[in-house]
Image (spheres, rainbow, N blue to C red):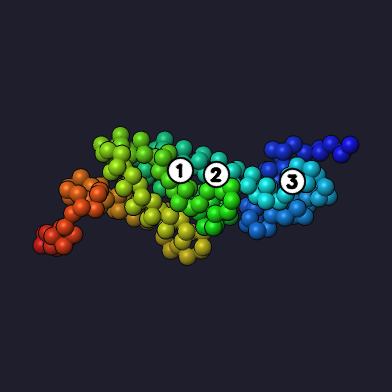
Amino acid sequence: MAPKNKFTREEMIEAAVCVVQRNGIDSLTAKALAAQLGVSTQPVFTCFHTIDEAKREVHAAAEKLYDSYVAKGLKMPIPFYGFGMQYIRFAKEEPELYRLLFLTEAEEGRRSVMDAMHHSRDLVRQSLQQIYHIDEQAADRYFRDMWLVVHGLATLVVTGGCPYSEQEMGEILTGFSVSLCRSIKEIPGFVENRYDRDTVFREIVKQ
Protein backbone atom coordinates (compact mmCIF):
# COMPACT_ATOMS: atom_id res chain seq x y z
CA MET A 1 0.00 0.00 0.00
CA ALA A 2 1.34 3.42 -0.95
CA PRO A 3 2.02 5.77 1.97
CA LYS A 4 -0.70 8.34 2.67
CA ASN A 5 0.07 11.80 1.32
CA LYS A 6 0.25 14.25 4.25
CA PHE A 7 -0.81 17.10 1.95
CA THR A 8 -4.31 17.49 0.56
CA ARG A 9 -4.75 18.01 -3.16
CA GLU A 10 -5.76 21.61 -2.48
CA GLU A 11 -2.54 22.21 -0.54
CA MET A 12 -0.51 20.68 -3.36
CA ILE A 13 -2.23 22.97 -5.88
CA GLU A 14 -1.59 26.01 -3.67
CA ALA A 15 2.09 25.08 -3.52
CA ALA A 16 2.20 24.67 -7.31
CA VAL A 17 0.62 28.12 -7.73
CA CYS A 18 3.31 29.59 -5.46
CA VAL A 19 6.03 28.11 -7.66
CA VAL A 20 4.45 29.57 -10.79
CA GLN A 21 3.84 32.97 -9.17
CA ARG A 22 7.56 33.26 -8.47
CA ASN A 23 9.12 31.93 -11.66
CA GLY A 24 6.46 31.19 -14.26
CA ILE A 25 4.72 28.07 -15.53
CA ASP A 26 7.87 26.58 -17.09
CA SER A 27 9.47 26.46 -13.65
CA LEU A 28 6.84 24.05 -12.36
CA THR A 29 8.56 20.67 -12.16
CA ALA A 30 8.14 17.78 -9.76
CA LYS A 31 11.44 18.77 -8.14
CA ALA A 32 10.42 22.42 -7.75
CA LEU A 33 7.03 21.48 -6.29
CA ALA A 34 8.64 19.01 -3.91
CA ALA A 35 11.08 21.70 -2.76
CA GLN A 36 8.19 24.10 -2.16
CA LEU A 37 6.52 21.48 0.03
CA GLY A 38 9.72 20.34 1.70
CA VAL A 39 9.30 16.70 0.63
CA SER A 40 10.60 14.24 -1.93
CA THR A 41 8.99 14.00 -5.36
CA GLN A 42 7.04 10.88 -4.35
CA PRO A 43 4.09 12.79 -2.80
CA VAL A 44 3.92 14.96 -5.92
CA PHE A 45 3.29 11.93 -8.13
CA THR A 46 0.95 10.45 -5.52
CA CYS A 47 -1.24 13.52 -6.04
CA PHE A 48 -0.65 14.22 -9.74
CA HIS A 49 -0.19 11.57 -12.39
CA THR A 50 1.97 13.95 -14.42
CA ILE A 51 3.35 17.45 -13.98
CA ASP A 52 1.07 18.51 -16.85
CA GLU A 53 -1.87 17.65 -14.62
CA ALA A 54 -0.44 19.96 -11.97
CA LYS A 55 -0.05 22.71 -14.58
CA ARG A 56 -3.68 22.34 -15.58
CA GLU A 57 -4.70 22.74 -11.96
CA VAL A 58 -2.57 25.87 -11.67
CA HIS A 59 -4.23 27.25 -14.78
CA ALA A 60 -7.66 26.63 -13.27
CA ALA A 61 -6.58 28.29 -10.02
CA ALA A 62 -5.25 31.29 -11.96
CA GLU A 63 -8.59 31.61 -13.77
CA LYS A 64 -10.43 31.55 -10.45
CA LEU A 65 -8.19 34.27 -9.01
CA TYR A 66 -8.59 36.36 -12.18
CA ASP A 67 -12.38 36.03 -11.93
CA SER A 68 -12.24 37.41 -8.38
CA TYR A 69 -10.45 40.52 -9.71
CA VAL A 70 -13.13 40.91 -12.40
CA ALA A 71 -15.94 40.50 -9.87
CA LYS A 72 -14.46 43.28 -7.76
CA GLY A 73 -14.23 45.55 -10.79
CA LEU A 74 -17.84 44.93 -11.77
CA LYS A 75 -18.98 46.19 -8.36
CA MET A 76 -17.50 49.63 -9.03
CA PRO A 77 -19.81 52.56 -10.03
CA ILE A 78 -18.76 52.22 -13.70
CA PRO A 79 -18.49 48.44 -14.12
CA PHE A 80 -16.48 48.24 -17.32
CA TYR A 81 -14.01 50.87 -16.13
CA GLY A 82 -13.71 48.80 -12.97
CA PHE A 83 -13.14 45.67 -15.05
CA GLY A 84 -10.42 47.37 -17.08
CA MET A 85 -8.55 48.67 -14.06
CA GLN A 86 -8.83 45.33 -12.27
CA TYR A 87 -7.55 43.55 -15.39
CA ILE A 88 -4.51 45.82 -15.31
CA ARG A 89 -4.15 45.36 -11.55
CA PHE A 90 -4.18 41.58 -11.98
CA ALA A 91 -1.34 41.94 -14.50
CA LYS A 92 0.59 44.15 -12.08
CA GLU A 93 0.08 42.03 -8.97
CA GLU A 94 0.17 38.58 -10.59
CA PRO A 95 2.45 38.97 -13.64
CA GLU A 96 3.27 35.29 -14.03
CA LEU A 97 -0.35 34.22 -13.74
CA TYR A 98 -1.27 36.92 -16.26
CA ARG A 99 1.39 35.54 -18.61
CA LEU A 100 -0.06 32.07 -18.13
CA LEU A 101 -3.63 33.13 -18.92
CA PHE A 102 -3.10 35.79 -21.57
CA LEU A 103 0.41 35.49 -23.03
CA THR A 104 0.95 31.73 -23.27
CA GLU A 105 0.01 29.56 -26.22
CA ALA A 106 -2.90 27.31 -25.37
CA GLU A 107 -2.27 23.63 -24.80
CA GLU A 108 -4.66 20.69 -24.58
CA GLY A 109 -7.08 21.17 -21.72
CA ARG A 110 -6.42 24.91 -21.44
CA ARG A 111 -8.35 27.72 -23.05
CA SER A 112 -6.66 30.06 -25.50
CA VAL A 113 -6.19 33.80 -25.05
CA MET A 114 -9.26 34.42 -27.19
CA ASP A 115 -11.22 31.92 -25.13
CA ALA A 116 -10.17 33.90 -22.05
CA MET A 117 -11.29 37.12 -23.74
CA HIS A 118 -14.68 35.60 -24.55
CA HIS A 119 -14.97 34.38 -20.96
CA SER A 120 -14.37 37.95 -19.73
CA ARG A 121 -16.86 39.30 -22.26
CA ASP A 122 -19.54 36.97 -20.96
CA LEU A 123 -18.90 38.17 -17.40
CA VAL A 124 -19.18 41.83 -18.42
CA ARG A 125 -21.85 41.83 -21.16
CA GLN A 126 -24.93 42.31 -18.97
CA SER A 127 -23.49 45.28 -17.12
CA LEU A 128 -22.52 46.91 -20.43
CA GLN A 129 -26.05 46.54 -21.76
CA GLN A 130 -27.57 48.00 -18.60
CA ILE A 131 -25.16 50.91 -18.08
CA TYR A 132 -24.79 52.05 -21.69
CA HIS A 133 -28.30 51.10 -22.88
CA ILE A 134 -27.07 49.04 -25.82
CA ASP A 135 -28.04 45.65 -27.18
CA GLU A 136 -25.99 42.47 -26.94
CA GLN A 137 -24.31 42.88 -30.32
CA ALA A 138 -23.22 46.43 -29.51
CA ALA A 139 -22.05 45.36 -26.04
CA ASP A 140 -19.88 42.62 -27.57
CA ARG A 141 -18.40 45.07 -30.10
CA TYR A 142 -17.70 47.58 -27.34
CA PHE A 143 -16.08 44.91 -25.18
CA ARG A 144 -13.88 43.54 -27.96
CA ASP A 145 -12.48 46.92 -28.93
CA MET A 146 -11.97 48.09 -25.34
CA TRP A 147 -10.44 44.76 -24.32
CA LEU A 148 -7.76 45.20 -26.95
CA VAL A 149 -6.82 48.53 -25.32
CA VAL A 150 -6.93 47.09 -21.80
CA HIS A 151 -4.95 44.01 -22.87
CA GLY A 152 -2.32 46.20 -24.52
CA LEU A 153 -1.82 48.28 -21.38
CA ALA A 154 -1.74 45.22 -19.13
CA THR A 155 0.83 43.55 -21.37
CA LEU A 156 3.02 46.67 -21.21
CA VAL A 157 2.80 46.45 -17.42
CA VAL A 158 3.81 42.78 -17.36
CA THR A 159 6.70 43.22 -19.78
CA GLY A 160 8.04 46.22 -17.87
CA GLY A 161 7.52 48.72 -20.67
CA CYS A 162 4.54 50.71 -19.40
CA PRO A 163 5.37 54.42 -18.88
CA TYR A 164 1.88 55.32 -17.64
CA SER A 165 0.65 55.78 -14.08
CA GLU A 166 -2.59 54.16 -12.93
CA GLN A 167 -4.32 57.51 -13.28
CA GLU A 168 -3.03 57.94 -16.83
CA MET A 169 -4.16 54.45 -17.79
CA GLY A 170 -7.59 55.25 -16.39
CA GLU A 171 -7.71 58.39 -18.52
CA ILE A 172 -6.70 56.39 -21.61
CA LEU A 173 -9.51 53.90 -20.99
CA THR A 174 -12.02 56.71 -20.46
CA GLY A 175 -11.00 58.42 -23.69
CA PHE A 176 -11.37 55.26 -25.76
CA SER A 177 -14.65 54.45 -24.03
CA VAL A 178 -16.17 57.84 -24.85
CA SER A 179 -15.08 57.58 -28.49
CA LEU A 180 -16.41 54.05 -28.85
CA CYS A 181 -19.74 54.79 -27.16
CA ARG A 182 -20.31 57.79 -29.41
CA SER A 183 -19.47 55.74 -32.50
CA ILE A 184 -21.85 52.95 -31.49
CA LYS A 185 -24.70 55.33 -30.75
CA GLU A 186 -24.21 57.96 -33.46
CA ILE A 187 -22.86 56.16 -36.55
CA PRO A 188 -25.50 53.92 -38.18
CA GLY A 189 -23.99 50.56 -39.10
CA PHE A 190 -20.87 51.03 -36.94
CA VAL A 191 -21.43 47.89 -34.87
CA GLU A 192 -21.92 45.75 -37.96
CA ASN A 193 -19.06 47.47 -39.87
CA ARG A 194 -21.58 48.60 -42.50
CA TYR A 195 -20.84 52.31 -42.70
CA ASP A 196 -18.97 54.58 -45.12
CA ARG A 197 -15.66 55.15 -43.35
CA ASP A 198 -14.49 57.84 -45.77
CA THR A 199 -17.67 59.86 -45.37
CA VAL A 200 -17.58 59.57 -41.58
CA PHE A 201 -13.97 60.71 -41.38
CA ARG A 202 -14.57 63.60 -43.73
CA GLU A 203 -17.42 64.80 -41.54
CA ILE A 204 -15.29 64.51 -38.39
CA VAL A 205 -12.35 66.37 -39.94
CA LYS A 206 -14.60 69.23 -41.09
CA GLN A 207 -15.86 69.89 -37.55
User: Is residue 37 rendered to the left or right of residue 201?
Assistant: right
Q: Estimate the x, y position of residue 115 in percent, counting from the top left.
A: 47, 48
Q: Residue at x 59, y 43 (%)?
A: 60
Work out whether residue 92 can be spotted. Answer: no
Q: Secondary structure at mark 1?
A: helix
Farthest residue to the bottom: give it.
161
Q: Residue at x 48, y 53 (%)?
A: 113
Cα distance in 3D space between marks 2 and 3: 22 Å
| Label 2 or label 3, whichever comes before in sequence order | 3
**Label 3 sits on what residue type?**
His
Residue in front for this viewpoint, 171 or 48: 48
Q: Quadrant of the C terminus?
A: bottom left
Question: Up-down: is 94 above or below 61?
Answer: below
Q: Estimate the x, y position of residue 70 in percent, counting from the top left.
A: 46, 41
**Label 2 sits on what residue type?**
Glu
Which label sits in the foreground, 2 or 3?
Answer: 3
Q: Residue at x 83, y 47 (%)?
A: 42
**Label 1 sits on what residue type?**
His
Residue annotated with mark 3: 49
C-beta proximity under 8 Å, tags 2 and 1: yes
The crowding category of the residue bearing disc 1, from other C-alpha atoms within 10 Å (few below 14, some 14 to 19, many at least 20), is few
**Disc number for residue 63:** 2
Work out whether residue 43 can be spotted. Answer: yes
Cα distance in 3D space between marks 1 and 3: 29 Å
Q: Secondary structure at mark 2?
A: helix
User: Is residue 108 rendered to the left or right of residue 42?
Assistant: left
Q: Estimate the x, y position of residue 121 in percent, counting from the top left.
A: 40, 43
**Disc number for residue 119:** 1
Q: Secondary structure at mark 3?
A: loop
Q: Residue at x 59, y 51 (%)?
A: 108
